[in-house]
Image (cartoon, rainbow, N blue to C red):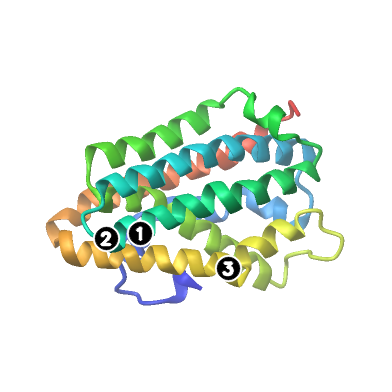
Amino acid sequence: MVAAGDACSLFARLRAASGQAWGAFIGHPFVQQLAAGTLDERCFRCYLSQDYLFLIHFARAYGLAAFKAETIADIRAAAGGLSAMIDQEMSLHVDYCRGWGLSEAEMATAEEDVATLAYTRFVLERGLAGDLLDLQVALAPCILGYAEIGHALLEAPSTVLAGNPYRAWIEMYAGADYQAVATAHSRQMDELFARRGSEARLPALATTFTQATRLETAFWQMGLTATAL
């Protein structure tokens, strides 16, 4: 698991600097109810619908990453991420959502929640105003946080797997494929920090990371309080 890796990695340092914000994100009641299998299905469907819209902007962020990249390796990584997002992950998400009674047409025309709007535009703004490192740090709580949550829920004795309608979601983010994506993102952040970073940049990067973490928490809360679908 990424979070159990090098304590000197940029991710580990940013995670520690975020203080209580990180714990509030990974331990949010939405996550706890997923683990227990008690989350209201209407809340989960709303979350899935907004997550579809989120993934669209996430794909845009990968396109921005290619523009911000300064090496062929970084351009290739961004292009690979964009291709995987629009050709694989979006299709998987749509298929999964169909099992929850949500069509792609329905999700594509859903009104973007304020929490979704705030989070996605913050990420894009950080990428537009800063460099590739700023963008990757803004994306990190989502990519690395879901890996940590998935792994923790699957390993926790208190997690209810038998008969849990959210078991597939937990296993997806705990799975080797997603964990590899998270590990690659953490390593790229380390490489970018080594090339373009310095200790003087750490406070600003920590601010970006912590704000994105809080926006992740707000995204959970949006799902938890929704009953429209």
Q: Which residue is mark 2?
A: 72
> How far apart are the alpha carbons under marks 3 and 2?
24 Å
Q: Position of residue 224 (x, y in %)?
A: 66, 38
Type of amino acid under label 3: Asp
Q: Which mark is residue 139?
A: none
Amino acid type, callout 2: Ile
In the picture, the disc for residue 76 is: 1
Q: Residue at x 44, y 36 (%)?
A: 120
State the image coordinates of residue 129 (x, y, percent, origin top left): 23, 37
Task: Say whether disc 1 or disc 3 marks the residue closer to the N-terminus.
Answer: 1
Give the distance between the C-alpha atoms of the residues marked 1 and 3, in whole angstroms: 19 Å
Residue behind mark 3: 177
Q: Is residue 203 visible?
A: yes
- Point 31% across, 55% down: residue: 75
In the image, residue 108 lies at what x, y percent? 63, 29
Secondary structure, mark 1, is: helix
Q: Residue visible at 49% across and 44% down?
A: 216
